[in-house]
Amino acid sequence: MPDITEPPQWLSNDPTVYRAPTTYTDKPAPPPTTAPLTRADVLSLLEADQDLWPQPLTEEQIISWWDSAPDWSWKYITSSTATSTTTGLFFCIPLRKSSFRMLQRGKLKEHQIGEEHIWKPAEDGEREVGLHVFHVEKDQTKAGWRREWGGMMARAFADLQLVVKKHGVEVLGYSALAVTPDGFRAFKNAGFELFDIERSAEHTPVEGVEPDAPSLLALPKSKDNLESATFAPSNGYWFFKEAQENQDSMVVF
Ligand SMILES: CC(C)(COP(=O)(O)OP(=O)(O)OC[C@H]1O[C@@H](n2cnc3c(N)ncnc32)[C@H](O)[C@@H]1OP(=O)(O)O)[C@@H](O)C(=O)NCCC(=O)NCCS
C-alpha cells in the first residue's frame, strides 16, 4: 500500500524562488489522481503559508477549515506500483453567500474566516457558495505538469467543478489572495480580476496599528493602479472571478 501520509516537503515558503520547471528528464509519469489532505498536510501548509504571508492564522482555524469542508481541498498524487508521490495541493474554502460578499467588500479578510463563514451541506438549505482558493501549489520539480498533465490551475478548477456538481450548489464566484509571482500570474491567466491590494503589516508597520493586530492593510487604490499593478513581494493581491453565466459555473481558461 503506498504511503501517502507524508506531508509534501516541497511546499514553497520563499516567494522569490518560484519558477515553472525548465528541465524534463524523467520518463512520462502517470497522470495524478486526487487524494484527501491529511492533518499533517494541512499543518505543513500552515507553516509554509506563515513564512510566505505572515497573518494571524492559527492551527485550530486552518484545521477547522479543513474539517468543515473536507472535500473542497485535496492533493494530487502519482502512483507507481511501489511508490506514491504528492505532486500538488489545492485548498479551497466554500463560503456562505453573506461571507463571500463580505470578502468581496474587504470586510472579511482571509485570516478572519471562521467556521461560521463556511458553507456546509444541508445547512439552512443554502445553495449558493463563493469559492475562496486559500492555496494552490504544484511540485515544480515534477516536469509532468503542463507537458503531459496540463496546467495545474486548469486541472484543479476542473476537479473543483466535480465537487460543485456533487453538492448541487450554485457558484457565485471565486476569490484568491495571491502573494507570489506565480499566484499573481496564474490567477490573472485564469481570467480573475485584480480587485484590491493589501500589504503585510509585518513588512510595513503602520502608525496606530498594533503589531499583533490583523496584519493586513488595504492600500489606497484606483482602477488605474490596479490595472497597471505588477507583483511586489510585500503585497497581497486579491483576485475575484464571477461565475460564468450559462456555462455551468465553469472557470474557463
Ligand atoms: C500557481 C501554480 C500552481 C500554477 O501552475 P500552472 O497552472 O501549472 O501554471 P504555471 O505557473 O506552471 O504556468 C502558467 C504559464 O506561465 C508561464 N510561466 C511560468 N513561469 C513563468 C515566469 N517565471 N515568467 C513568465 N511566465 C511564466 C508558463 O510557461 C505558463 O505559460 P503557458 O500557459 O503559455 O504554458 C504554480 O505556478 C505553482 O505551484 N507555483 C508555486 C506556488 C504558488 O506560488 N502558489 C500561489 C500561491 S498564492
Image: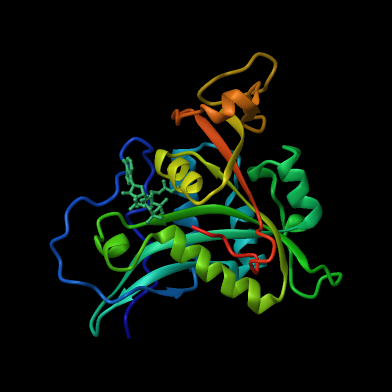
Q: Residue lying farthest top?
A: 207
Say which of 151 and 211 sits in front: 151
Q: Is residue 95 above or below residue 58?
A: below
Q: Residue lying farthest right?
A: 124
The colour mode here is rainbow
Residue 188 visible = yes
Q: Is residue 108 above or below residue 74?
A: above
Say which of 231 and 135 sits in front: 231
Residue 147 on image: x %, y %: 27, 63
Left or right of 234 in this view: 24: left
Q: Residue lying farthest front?
A: 246
Say which of 74 and 188 sits in front: 188
Residue 40 visible = no
Rendered image quadrant of residue 86: bottom left
Rendered image quadrant of residue 17: top left
Residue 60 on image: x %, y %: 62, 55
Q: Residue at x 57, y 54 (%)?
A: 133
Q: How many marks?
A: 0
Q: Residue at x 37, y 47 (%)?
A: 12
Q: Residue at x 82, y 68 (%)?
A: 126
User: Looking at the rendering, in which quadrant would you find the N terminus?
Assistant: bottom left
Left or right of 137 in this view: 60: right
Residue 67 on image: x %, y %: 63, 67
Say which of 152 and 208 sits in front: 152
Residue 68 on image: x %, y %: 67, 66
Q: Residue at x 45, y 28 (%)?
A: 232
